[in-house]
Amino acid sequence: MKNEEKYVWLIRHGKSAWPSGVPDLERPLNERGRRDGATMAQVLATTEHVPQLFYSSDSERTRQTTELLNEVLKIPVTITHDLYTGAHHTVETLLRQTGEWLSCVAVVSHLPTIESCIRATNEWPEESGFPTLAAVCYELSGKWKQIEFAESRFKEFFMPRMFRGDSK
């Protein structure tokens, strides 16, 4: 691998519960979200590009998703409210602060934020949308401080139902 190659995983949080009266920011994962989180932790740990750092939204379901993924990976986590509703420019700004010694990071966020990043790549081959706990990896050329999603290249895509016996 060249020193200039960087990889970013864009991961949508797990399936959440909808408890009555609980604000969106505080909604937790439901049972399926917790189960899928454990599955996807194993998937990420065995991919060609294993994350070395998590950037996570501060919502409860996203923090819980990151914790589940990190039970296997055991890597540093940076939590920020900027990922709760940010667009791809927000994520690029965050990634540009990444230390050059890291070659792969993961961003755990929400569909509007993740979708904005994917649309900015101009490279999304998946027709099934982006369900909860889906994860897509892109290769970025150059240094972190110069990255742009528009210059990225699709590498891998996984979603929980690829690893379970049902179609839910």
Image (cartoon, grey):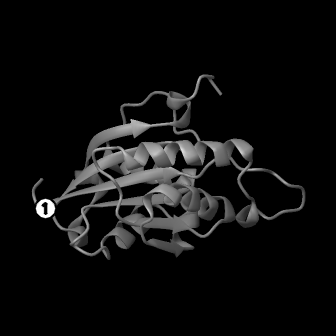
Q: Which secondary structure, mark 1?
A: loop
Assess disc 1: are there few (<14), some (14-19) or many (≥20) residues with their C-alpha within 10 Å of its C-alpha. Answer: few
Total marks in image = 1
What is the x, y in percent for residue 109?
A: 53, 58
Identify the residue position indicated by label 1 in the image: 4
61 relative to 150 in the view: left or right: right
The reply to whether residue 5 is visible in this rendering is yes
Q: Amino acid at mark 1?
A: Glu
What is the x, y in percent for residue 150?
A: 27, 52
The reply to whether residue 123 is visible in this rendering is no
At horizontal 46% and vertical 45% (from top left) the residue drawn is: 42
Q: 129 or 51, which lies in front?
A: 51
Q: Which image quarter is the C terminus in? A: top right
At horizontal 55% and vertical 53% (from top left) the residue drawn is: 112
130 relative to 27 in the view: left or right: left
Q: 86 or 105, which lies in front?
A: 105
Q: 34 or 127, which lies in front?
A: 34
What is the x, y in percent for residue 99?
A: 27, 75
At horizontal 32% and vertical 43% (from top left) the residue drawn is: 122
75 relative to 32 in the view: left or right: left
- When asked about the image quadrant of residue 106, the answer is bottom left
Q: Residue furthest right?
A: 20
Q: Residue furthest left?
A: 2
What is the x, y in percent for residue 62?
A: 60, 60
